[in-house]
Structures are given as C-alpha cells and as structure tokens.
Image: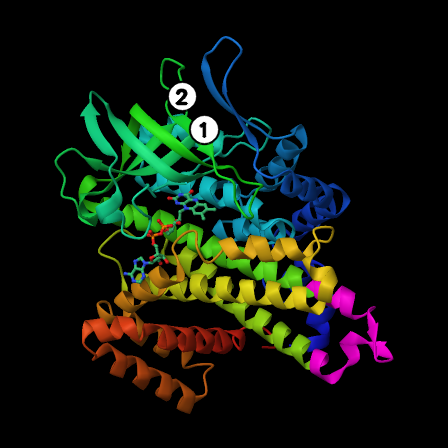
C-alpha cells in the first residue's frame, strides 16, 4: 500500500480503516462517531484524564451504602456515544462482531481507556448469550443491548489480590449453590468498569479443586433481587492512565450470582471471555499507534530545525516510513484476529484446529501490538522533543495509556507462555504456517517453522527461558506476512 496514502489517512481512524481495505458496512456511523469525537469528545476525554481518579461516594447522606462513582455528567455523554453506535448491540442485531471492533478502533484512537467499558460489556453479553440459560438471557441480555441512555454495562472480574496470572491458585472467591442461584463470597482486586450493572466473574464452587479446573464462570448483577447492592466497591484505583474507566476493588458478600455454562468447563469459558478482551486490546493498541504517529507527523511537518521541517531530514523521514510499516503490519495482525474470532466464537470445547490457531494469533496479537503501542508512543514523544513530555499536549498521555496495554488482560509473559502452550500441546504453529504460506517468502517461512519445531524439542524449563526471542520474532514474522494479505500490502 502506498506509504503516502496511509500517511494522508493518519489523522482519521475511519479513513485509515478504509485505506487498509477493511470492509466498512457502517462507514456513515463511524464517520459520525469520529465527527463527535473531533467536535466534543476530545475535550471531554482530556478533562477526564486530567481530573485523575474519579471519586467514590460510598454512602448517602443517611449513611446507606450506595457506591456511586462520581464522574462529571459529560463522562456519561462520552460513554454513551459508543454504546449507541453499536459497540455491543451490533454483535447481536446488526453487522456482526467485526462491526463492534470498528467502533472500538475509532473510540480507542481518541481514548484507549474508554474502549475498555465497551469491551467488557461485549464480553459479558457474548458469554451470557453463549452460556446463559434461556430464562437468564431473557432477563439480562436486553438491557445490555439497549441503544439509549438506559443501556446496562458489563464487566469481567477474575483477578484477586494474590495475582492475576495464576488464577487457578489465586482465586479465593467461593460459590455456594442456593435454590435456583448461587451465593458468591470473596473479593476482586482489579475490577474495571466497577459499578457495572452486570459482571462475569470467576469463582470456585465449594469443594472444587484449587486448580484452574476448579473455576467456574458466574453472572453477577449489581443489585440483588430485593433491590439492595449485590457487591460493594471498596475503593477506586489511582492509575497512570485509562482514567476513563473506573477500576476498583470489589467485595462480594453472599452475592447473588448465576452459573454460566458448566463448572466442569468453567476455565474454558473464562478464557473465552479473556480472549475477547485480548483481541480488543490489540485493536485498541493499533488505534493508539495510529494516533501517536498522527500527532508526531503533525508536529514534524511544522517544526523546523537546520533549515527545514524535521520531517524532511533523512533520518526522521526513514523513521516515519518504518513506523507506518509497523502500523500496517500490527493492524493486519489485529484485524485478522478479529476475523478469526468471528469465525470460531460459536465453538465449544473440544475446540477445532482453527480455534487453536485463533488462540495462538490472539496471544501473538495481544503481545505484539501492545509492545508496539508503547514503543510508538515513546517515539512520538521523542519526535516532539521537550514538548512531548508536557501535560498540556496529548502526546505524554498516549505513553501513559499505552503502558497499561501490555499488562491488563494478561502480561507479555502470560501471552508468550500461553502461546507456547498452544504450539506445544495443540500444534497451532502448524496451522499458522500452513495458512501464512500463501503470502510468505518460502525460505523465511521454512526457517521460522524450523526454529519453532527445534524450540519445542527443548526441555520445558529451557523452552520457557528462551521463549521471548522466539515469540517476538514469530509475532513480527506473522504480522509482516499478514500485512501482505491486505489490499496493496
Ligand atoms: C488498569 C488495570 C485494569 C485491570 N482490570 C481488570 C479487570 O477488569 N478484571 C480482571 O480480572 N483483571 C484486571 N486487571 C488485572 C490484570 O489482568 C492483571 O494485572 C494481570 O493479569 C497480571 O496479574 P498481576 O498484576 O496480579 O501480576 P502477577 O500475576 O502477580 O504477576 C507478577 C509478574 O510475574 C509475571 N509472571 C507470572 N507468572 C509467570 C511465569 N510463569 N513466568 C514468568 N513470569 C511470570 C507476570 O507476568 C508479572 O510480570 C487490570 C489491571 C490493570 C493494570
């Protein structure tokens, strides 16, 4: 694809999507959303970021627990834009799952953190649709799919104080059956979109083993059937970025909850939820890369040093060309993962080879795009020189926002090790290489495939110790190859 065409598209997420050749069945809606962000959203988003952590009003004036999160009214207006546009409902009633990621892309270009509420709401709705019984769906799905100001939000709470990577060992929340539902007691330590009307949470049914196989997935409403609060928000976290989503600590005390799916397959259901968020994280990371490059370009075109705009110095020009190539490749990796998610989402365990290919691509995409987002945001700051570190301009914010992307929804270590598992135990790399063969240089493909096979023969400790370089190279190779599968790539 002509570098010049992509460069011209940089200031606009919708134009960039179009330049990448992605089908845009909701183009008019994306343009409308983008126009809103330009006219109003940017300023609201900047204000929310500068305000820092929102307040938690835990009690009303009469001492009753209410756990209300105090954002200014503009926040709600900003949040509703994406829900109205179809960040959740379009997956069910409209153009399908991919359309929700298009809305996510436009949103994250302007505010990476705001894409989180849409993502976790989508993941909640998908899990409910796939694993909820008909009565549960009839009761709880419609409010999640509303298109007006009454729309409900979702959340996905797995992590507890002992850590988020090793859920099998660290989830202490216990689930006890009672009548037609369950009672959950425990706490969730990193609970994004705290205050959501519904959450999907990991808990351990009483007596289940203290391994990942002992975990099950539950639907947890904000209010009990008698109208009382069903979970308490202990406090909100003071975060470096993503301030447009409240992340809190949540206490469950005999909270009413409903089982999704079956306890025996709970861990698969939990991982399916996490994988939706990882795909969204990749889309958000690429959108952030685009925004950072666009800001850098706007500055470099006008800032003059040594007699010409800094953009026109050979070293800078070369860096821009490379960044745009990286952006194109990262987008190809992330968007291909979206397409595969759409294809394999209906599957149940035991999964097909195609599903394991999706899993491997998801780990590669989450790992690679988040890393690229951080590097690109850092570079955009450098392009701005001293102006880049000032709070007055948006550039320093992109670096703060980017720093969260590699960590939430599983750190780089987790992505690397889970990716290794998908290759070692499920042979997902073979499907990957067979698939990439259409676009790859045959020698490079053979070399990469031999490296992976040789790696998988190493003793397991050594496999893990040496996994990073392999995974990094595999991610780059996959992204570069997939970029050739996009129009003009
Ligand atoms: C802003 C924000 C919002 C979040 N929102 C949510 C949310 O809504 N819901 C939710 O469930 N969670 C949420 N999280 C939690 C997030 O998913 C966890 O932070 C993440 O999974 C890592 O867990 P941890 O922080 O407990 O680190 P730990 O699991 O304690 O890990 C510490 C370090 O050890 C590394 N490590 C662990 N195991 C290995 C290994 N085998 N080999 C090598 N290294 C290893 C980790 O990669 C990490 O670097 C959020 C986190 C953040 C920062």
**How crowded is the residue under tag 2: few (<14 C-alpha within 10 Å), some, or many (20+)?**
some
Mark 1 CB in 8 Å range of ligand 1? no
Residue 51 is covered by the magenta coloring: no
Label 2 close to label 1 by CB (< 8 Å) = yes
Does any portion of residue 384 appear in the rendered image? Answer: no
Q: Residue at x 68, y 46 (%)?
A: 33
The numbered disc on residue 197 is 1
Residue 311 is covered by the magenta coloring: yes
Residue extending furthest toward the top: 62
Q: Which residue is mark 2?
A: 223
Query: Which is nearer the eye, 199 or 60?
Result: 60
Which stretch is magenta? Answer: 294-317
Query: Which is nearer the eye, 62 or 168?
Result: 62
Q: x%, y% of residue 440?
A: 45, 83
Does any portion of residue 249 appear in the rendered image? Answer: yes
**How crowded is the residue under tag 1: few (<14 C-alpha within 10 Å), some, or many (20+)?**
many
Query: Which is nearer the eye, 469 or 291?
Result: 469
The image quadrant where one finds the C terminus is bottom right
Q: x%, y% of residue 164?
A: 33, 48
Q: Is residue 419 left or right of residue 2?
A: left
Q: Residue at x 36, y 17 (%)?
A: 225
| Secondary structure at numbered mark 2 | loop
């Amino acid at each position: 694809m002509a570098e010049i065409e992509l460069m011209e598209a940089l200031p606009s997420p919708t134009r960039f999507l179009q330049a990448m050749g992605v089908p845009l069945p909701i183009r008019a809606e994306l343009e409308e959303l983008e126009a809103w962000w330009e006219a109003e959203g940017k300023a609201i988003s900047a204000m929310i970021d500068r305000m820092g952590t929102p307040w938690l009003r835990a009690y009303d004036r009469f001492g009753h627990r209410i756990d209300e999160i105090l954002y200014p009214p503009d926040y709600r207006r900003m949040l509703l834009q994406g829900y109205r546009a179809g960040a959740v409902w379009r997956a069910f009633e409209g153009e399908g799952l991919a359309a929700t990621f298009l809305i996510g892309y436009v949103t994250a270009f302007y505010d990476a953190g705001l894409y989180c509420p849409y993502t976790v709401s989508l993941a909640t709705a998908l899990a409910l649709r796939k694993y909820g019984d008909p009565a549960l769906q009839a009761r709880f799905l419609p409010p999640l799919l509303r298109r007006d100001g009454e729309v409900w939000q979702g959340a996905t709470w797995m992590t507890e104080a002992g850590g988020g990577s090793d859920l099998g060992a660290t989830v202490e929340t216990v689930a006890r059956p009672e009548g037609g539902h369950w009672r959950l007691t425990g706490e969730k330590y990193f609970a994004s979109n705290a205050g959501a009307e519904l959450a999907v949470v990991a808990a351990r049914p009483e007596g289940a083993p203290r391994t990942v196989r002992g975990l099950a997935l539950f639907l947890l409403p904000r209010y009990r059937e008698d109208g009382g609060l069903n979970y308490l928000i202990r406090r909100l976290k003071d975060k470096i970025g993503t301030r447009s989503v409240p992340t809190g600590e949540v206490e469950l005390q005999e909270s009413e909850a409903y089982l999704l799916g079956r306890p025996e397959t709970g861990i698969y259901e939990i991982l399916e939820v996490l994988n939706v968020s990882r795909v969204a994280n990749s889309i958000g990371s690429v959108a952030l890369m685009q925004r950072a490059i666009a800001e850098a370009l706007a500055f470099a075109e006008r800032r003059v040093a040594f007699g010409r705009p800094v953009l026109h110095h050979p070293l800078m020009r070369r860096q821009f060309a490379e960044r745009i190539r990286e952006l194109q490749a990262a987008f190809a990796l992330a968007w291909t993962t979206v397409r595969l998610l759409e294809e394999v989402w209906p599957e149940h365990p035991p999964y097909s080879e195609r599903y394991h290919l999706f899993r491997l691509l998801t780990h590669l995409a989450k790992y690679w795009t988040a890393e690229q987002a951080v590097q690109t945001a850092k570079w955009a700051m450098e392009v701005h020189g001293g102006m880049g570190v000032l709070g007055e301009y948006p550039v320093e914010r992109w670096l703060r926002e980017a720093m969260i992307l590699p960590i939430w929804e599983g750190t780089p270590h987790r992505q690397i090790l889970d990716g290794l598992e998908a290759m070692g135990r499920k042979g997902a790399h073979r499907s990957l290489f067979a698939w990439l063969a259409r676009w790859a240089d045959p020698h490079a493909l053979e070399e990469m495939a031999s490296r992976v096979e040789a790696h998988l023969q190493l003793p397991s400790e050594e496999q893990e110790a040496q996994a990073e370089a392999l995974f990094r190279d595999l991610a780059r190779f996959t992204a570069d190859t997939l970029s050739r599968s996009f129009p003009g790539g």
